[in-house]
Image: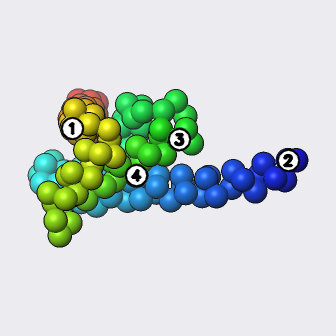
Amino acid sequence: MKKQLLIFLLPLFLVACVDKDQYEQVVLEEMKKEQDVKDYKIDPAYMAKCVIDTTYKRMPGFFAFDPDRMAAYHNYAKMLKMSMTKDPQKTLDELRKDFGSPQELAKAHSVYTESMMDCYTAILHEGDAEEKT
């Protein structure tokens, strides 16, 4: 019985890991392109980790492999890659459907943006505190 459960859950676990890794990679790529990260001389990997950690806390789902969280990983990555698609309008329509409504898509975008702003604030304050000591 335990083996059957493991066999059943293993593919779900692998898919969740792929979606989570894809989201993390997309955020890192975004941080490498972000002009403020360059201007303030913030390490893109450090900024990406902060943004990822902050958005995880605000995403739907209660734990890492919650089905809602797994869908959020996929949807957030797709949202961040929208500008790279051949047909942004089609992708936008898909995202509205994937998130459930245009309002939920807007909420997800706000979560990501607020996470970035929170991280800028925290990282820049870290730098200020180091300069004072």
Alpha carbons under labels 2 and 3: distance apart: 21 Å
Q: State the SS at label 4.
A: helix
> Residue 34's image quarter?
bottom left
**Contact flag, marks 2 and 4 (Cβ < 8 Å):** no
Alpha carbons under labels 2 and 1: distance apart: 41 Å
Residue for badge 1:
102
Residue type indicated by callout 4: His
Q: State the SS at label 1.
A: helix
Give the image location of residue 114, x and y in percent: 23, 33
Give the image location of residue 119, x and y in percent: 27, 36
Could one spot residue 119 in this view of the protein? no
Residue type indicated by callout 3: Pro
Could one spot residue 81 in this view of the protein? yes
Residue for badge 2:
2
Q: Residue at x 64, y 58 (%)?
A: 11
Q: Which label's residue is closer to the chain start, 1 or 3?
A: 3
Residue for badge 4:
74
Q: Residue at x 21, y 51 (%)?
A: 93
**Contact flag, marks 4 and 1 (Cβ < 8 Å):** no
In this rendering, the answer to whether 48 lies above or below 129 is below
Residue for badge 3:
67
Alpha carbons under labels 3 and 4: distance apart: 11 Å
Q: Which label's residue is closer to the chain start, 2 or 4?
A: 2
- Quadrant into which the C terminus falls: top left
